Amino acid sequence: MLDNLWLGFDVAVSWQNIVYAFAGCVLGTLIGVLPGIGPLATIAMLLPATYGLDPVAALIMLAGIYYGAQYGGSTTAILVNLPGEAASVVTVIDGHQMARQGRAGPALASAGIGSFFAGCVSTLVVAAFAPALVQVALDFGPWEYCALMLLGLIGAVVLASGSLLKATAMTLLGLLLGTVGTDAISGATRFTFGIPELSDGIGLLPIAMGIFGYGEIIKNLSAPGSVDRARLSTKVGRLMPNRADLKAMAPAIFRGTALGSFLGVLPGGGALLASFTAYTMEKKLGTRADEVPFGQGNIRGVAAPEAANNAGSQSSFIPLLSLGIPSNPVMAMMVGAMILHGIQPGPQVMTSNPDLFWGLIVSMWVGNLMLVILNLPLVGIWVKLLTVPYRWLFPSIVLFCAIGVFSRNYNSFDIWMVALFGLVGYVLIRLRCEPAPLLLGLILGPMLEDNLRRAMLIGRGDWSLFLTRGYSAALLVVAAVLLAMVMVPAIKRTREEAFAEES
């Protein structure tokens, strides 16, 4: 592993990749600070712009945007009670209370220290476990991949925030959208309704840009006060936490890091689930006599979720790099980036593109170091960006989305598709439907269908092979247990409580 990490350092610290890692971290912090954009929409918008870049540099920059947004989102959550990124929603609860008490500095420092520690640890976790999973994945056939993708779809439903019924509906809608186009095995066109542009299917970019980009813009414009009300209302003051703060936050950071590293690997997991679960766990552990209650400025309520969301955002690269399976919507966009650059996601990436595999892993550590420097000393600069009215930002975002999706295929039909799915995204938001399972269904559905049909062709229609092959049977058992567990009333209630703070 040390030899591989040395190869990664050789790639990650080249001047080109350092520049793109820095650009990703700056953009990630920026979109984390500014409400109403988010890393998913930003990556969707920038994906066509990376077409001319080296694949390693492009993925390093996109990864920096993802985990950089986790840092930036905590800044506005603490200072102005406005989470810039979804995973920072729970940071608002205690972080802003600390700021109102004149302790914004220690709150920001605990978020920065927790994120940096979690990022370093989860980078080592990725380096240790991803290659081991690659060795296992090399033994996978279509039966195992089919079972794995079924587990991913069930995980996307179970671990999605909100109603189970709505999450199931969103996953099924994604599966349906994934069937549009030409069947890869028979060559027949399906659900194109005579529209030739649909013969290649509905692209990932128009759907992602529409639902997560335009949909968010329409939502924000429908309630402009929610994004234009933020103003710098508190002073940061002294950054360094005192001894009592360090004593309280250190174990919380360890717990958040461990929890985030585990939850990020799960299908449907990632930064959002990790932050909510970490905060819920800290509340369940209770408070000591010398601590303030949660919700009134407890530093553990900042340190744990911030460590968890950064660890979760980085450990979610494990199934992507080792199995080629996205564990959350942002990883689905990373799959799109790899395909855009001619790289087939899966276990062969480590052997055929070791520079990309290890360079991306090491760039996470480099990026985390950059983010600490960017976020703590320069916090005042970032928060001043909140004074820019959203009505000045959204026209450029809309234009950039349109140019980006048009430059991919030079087809105006894609622009209309983005506009259509923008309306769909707004309707889903109004109906309080979590759109993330839709994107996972769109990515995993065609892969599930192809592997299922390939398994049936090779096995001459023998379904029992799914149960007689070891890895396949184990994955199906895990999927069945996960599905059965969430039906248990007590577990279902615990799941709802984990996301209770979101509403």
Image (cartoon, rainbow, N blue to C red):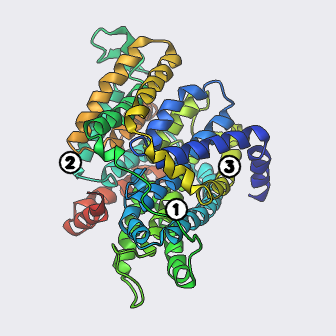
Find residue 493 and report its horizontal and vertical position in percent.
Answer: 22, 66
Kindly tell me whether residue 368 is visible in this rendering.
yes
**Amino acid type indicated by mark 3:** Ser
* Picture disc at residue 363: 3
Q: Nearer the viewer, mark 3 or mark 1?
A: 3
Find residue 106 and report its horizontal and vertical position in percent.
Answer: 53, 71
- Report helix, strand or loop for mark 2: helix
* Label located before the other in sequence (1 or 2): 2
Vertical side of 346 occupied by 415: above or below: above
| Whether label 3 touches label 2, CB < 8 Å | no
* Residue 129 location, quadrant: bottom right
Comparing 459 with 241, the one in front is 241
Residue at x 35%, y 76% (from the top left corner) = 294
* Residue 277 location, quadrant: bottom left
Residue at x 62%, y 59% (from the top left corner) = 377
Cα separation, mark 3 vs mark 1, equals: 17 Å
| Whether label 3 touches label 1, CB < 8 Å | no
Comparing 438 with 391, the one in front is 391
Cα separation, mark 1 vs mark 2, equals: 28 Å
Kindly tell me whether residue 138 is visible in this rendering.
no
Residue at x 61%, y 49% (from the top left corner) = 134
Residue receiving disc 2: 165
Query: Which image quarter holds the C terminus?
Result: bottom left
* Picture disc at residue 457: none
Find residue 79 and report its horizontal and vertical position in percent.
Answer: 44, 60
* Label located before the other in sequence (3 or 2): 2
Residue at x 41%, y 52% (from the top left corner) = 231
Comparing 237 with 20, the one in front is 237
* Label located before the other in sequence (3 or 1): 1
